[in-house]
Image (cartoon, rainbow, N blue to C red):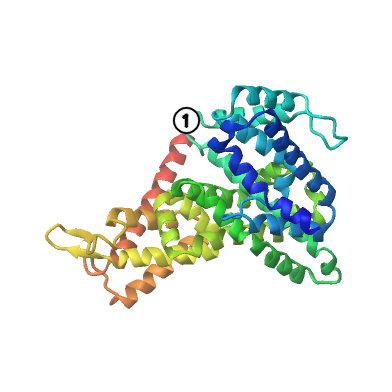
Amino acid sequence: MEAVLGQVEQLPALLAVSRSALVRDWDGLTLDRALEWARYFQHLHDRFRARPQLREALGRRLRRSQPCPLLGFPALGRCPQLLGLALLENRALPPAACRRLLRSLLQPPAAGPASDPRGLGLLARRKAAARLLALPRRGPGPEPQLQVEARLLLSRLRQEAGEAAGRLCGAQEGLQAGEAAGRLCGAQEGQLPWLCGALELLPQPRAFGVVAAALVLLKQGHGAEQAGDRDGDGDGSSSPGGYQESAAGEECTAGLLLSWLLGNQERFSAFCLCIPCSHLAFLAGHYSQLCRSYLDLLTGWGRCLHYDPLQGQWVRSCLEKAELSWEELREHFICLCQGSTPLKEQTQAALELLRTQDGDFRVRGLSVWTDLLMEIGYSCMDTKATKKLKKSSKSG
């Protein structure tokens, strides 16, 4: 078994070479050996996927061999596709080797029922989908590619969590539901290094958009589950204990994303500057942990403002610390107060407490919190009045 583990440890190197200029020297024999290794890794996946202990050992050794643990045990099953795509996109591959690769993908060797005759078609569909999603967006609404990336991220997290649930399946017999869910969440925490590595590969604004979209999908529920089913066998209940269908599983997945987001104050600050206020208000209304951190962050930004009597407005006292202007800070609080009733009440209670700690002033220009409460009150009244006017105009 140690020899097999050592072989699996070479998969990241194989994929790295296939993306490099080293393939310029590949001949037909070298290409055949690389493809044979890919099919061998796929065979290992099919052989050990029903054996939790061996599967865990292979996945652990595979993750250990990478600087960023992006490849897990499921990657073994996709190895022919991963290698084929990397080589097809590498312009350094000689023409003769490229033709041989295409023939191999079109007519893969008969390796039994596990062989996939759709290798090239699958790669073509995935590449075409990526190009289609990258087209300029027309009209309002979320960016399609961002939504797809968020769904794929959730699908991968569910897949890894399902395997963790399988390892705990026997240990959960006789446990109460809450205790079993706690063990599942504990097992899922091991995915955090993989999540960090995957998101670090994206530009920071893109990573923030994917995480925000994933958190929204978890609350919408149905759309994200459909994506996970399409990546699997279409039956969410096939995983141990029906993990993909469970509320506890979704809560653990959300907790994992929030751990990445809130675990670094600088990262969370950049997230709140990148994501629109209305989206942040939605997330704050559905995730209490994020709401508390968000209000604390806005409080810190508000304390960096001071009132300039010559300009008659709040200005930044220290440009290197004050991330938001008065207008931007006001917009964040207005969006929070236009959310759900509990979110509005929590926001107003936080502002009232800050106003009391600041001297409980009731006139403008003395406390930023007093001025925010006044602005929010007027804004909410204006919003309600606007809605009433629209309703009356429609009825008329």
Say above or below: 363 vs 23. below
Give percent across and percent down for residue 222. 68, 45
Q: Is residue 113 left or right of residue 147?
A: right
Q: Quadrant of residue 334?
A: bottom left
> Residue at coordinates 53% horizontally, 41% vertically from top-left?
146
Residue at the right extreme? 112
320 and 288: which is toward the camera: 320
Q: Residue at x 42, y 51 (%)?
A: 277
Q: Is residue 130 left or right of residue 118?
A: left
- Which quarter of the rendering shows the N terminus? bottom right
**In terms of secondary structure, where does tag 1 sit?**
loop
Task: Examine the rendered structure and indicate whether residue 316 appears above or below residue 205.
Answer: below
Give the residue type that dot 1 points to: Gly
Left or right for 114, reference 33: right
Q: Which residue is mark 1?
A: 139
**Along the line of sight, which residue is nearer the eye, 367 or 143?**
143
Instruction: Please rate how many residues cluster around mark 1, counting C-alpha atoms within 10 Å: few if below 14, some from 14 to 19, many from 20.
Output: few
Give the answer, above or below, for where 15 lies relative to 365.
Answer: above
Residue at left 28%, top 56%?
325
Above or below for 227 versus 190:
above
- From the top left corner, tell me how far across and down residue 312 is, in percent: 16, 59
